[in-house]
Amino acid sequence: MHGDGTKQAITTSDMAQARLLDLTRSMRRAGRVATGIDRVELAYLKRFLQEDVPVFGLVRSPFGYLLLDRTGLAEISDKFHGIIPWGRADIWSSIWPGRSRAARQAESDLRRAAADRSTRHRLRAMLARKLPRDYTYFNIGHSNITERVLRGIKRSGGEIHAMVHDVIPLEYPAYQRPGTVVPFRIKMQLLRGYADRLIYNSQDTQKRCEEQMLAWGEFPASIVAHLGVEPATPDPSALPPNAKPDCPYFVCVGTIEPRKNHAFLLDLWEQMGAGAPPLLICGSRGWNNDAVFKRLDQMRPFGVVRELPDLSDAALSALVQGASGMLFPSHAEGFGLPPLEAAQLGTRVLCNDLPVLHEILRDWAHFTPVSEPDLWVTNIKKWEKIQPNAKIRDGIPGPTWDDHFKTVLRLN
């Protein structure tokens, strides 16, 4: 991903509107292991910098808003991608406590790279001053969706195109962090009222979101564009010592939170007993999951079930590619990036029988409802007998970012 700002530009139509990409989420999550949504937002930054269309970035800071032009975005792109380190944190970033050092450094670098700034109440004036009258605002990360921002975009001549990754907080509120469901509902209601177009990562997400929005009135025009999938190049040397077992093993990738259903896998491993193969749980601990955390805390450090948080992308790809199978018993998904990446790496996937996973993975996964745990055990034992790197078939040709942007940008 080096040098996104210096690559040869992708030629586009002279009629394409200027683009304003919201990077608030990327700033707030700087220095943390990237989630799927984080990677999508940065894929948009990378693509927009490659094209010969005017591009700007918008970030909400504790003091108001920062506006970056192409030069500023090119300057901070490699920092967002972790290629070069963030600079020093300035004095302003220390006024608001409780944030990570990396987030404060990112905010400081963005402030230094900004072409303009505004207070919260002067956003519309800044946008009208710096951007062409007709431009498109892209909100990809479910962040900075407020009435002030959306109204400011509209009043300064912008169109609003927003991605909806899922509506799981509205469908499964019990799985969410305390205090997050109502703000999420408000965001979706604001998008219903202000957005010119919604971008969905799957037909399943589109269907579920429109079912929610129907209760609030008419919903915006929309398109479905499957996300591009580019698994990191596997690098076994990036793995921590003793992370990879020397026998057939299975992996589960994702934040350890109730929706991902790690409890189901722990139950399976208890059922299989001492002869069970190693299970590597790759992901950070999340929320509302004390019972699972307690069970994990009781596991021996290098026992049959191992917890491996904070792996680099290259290290994670190495573990996934070497596994006898990826296990994905999630209760609900908007897209299903981990199993699709595993399939692209040539690894078998055993997953819950969800409509969205059928849409994304087609016949490249083994779909088994979590209501049938004995079938899961049967498949795990069968796959364990096959050498970790003896794959049933080559990796699948999944969706690409070129495919995604051909759909998303054809009207922009």
Image: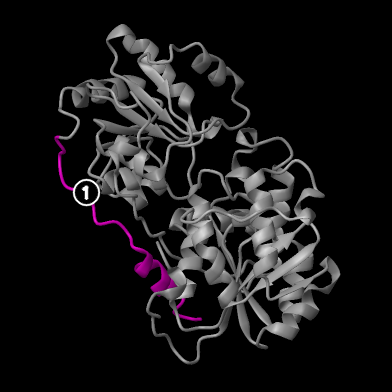
Which secondary structure type mostly characterizes the magenta part of the structure? loop
Q: Residue furthest right?
A: 121
Amino acid type for the residue under numbered disc 1: Gly
Left or right placement of residue 330 versus residue 400 in this view: right
Out of 391 and 356, give the one closest to the viewer. 391
Please tell me whether residue 237 is drawn above or below residue 21 in the rendered image.
Answer: above
- The reply to whether residue 268 is visible in this rendering is yes
Spot the residue most to the top: 274
In the image: residue 34, left or right of residue 148: left
Kindly state the secondary structure of the residue where label 1 is placed.
loop
Say whether residue 408 is visible.
no
Q: Quadrant of residue 194?
A: bottom right
Residue, far front: 88
- The foreground one among 143 and 361 is 143
What residue is shown at x 35% (from left), y 44% (from top)?
314
| Residue situated in front as seen by the camera: 150 or 111 | 111
Tell me which corner region of the image, top left, top right, bottom left or bottom right, holds residue 253. top left
Q: Position of residue 211 (x, y in %)?
A: 58, 55
Q: Position of residue 263 (x, y in %)?
A: 48, 22
The color scheme shown is one colour
Q: Which residues are magenta?
A: 390-412
Estimate how packed mark 1 is, as few (under 14), some (14 to 19) or many (20 or more) residues with alpha carbons within 10 Å.
some
Q: Residue at x 58, y 18 (%)?
A: 291
How many numbered tags mark residues here?
1
Q: Is residue 339 above or below residue 202?
A: above
**Which residue is located at x 43 percent, y 75 percent?**
6
Quickly name the residue at label 1. Answer: 395
Displayed quadrant of residue 19: bottom right
Residue visible at 52% across and 33% down? Answer: 284
User: The N terminus is located in which quarter?
Assistant: bottom left
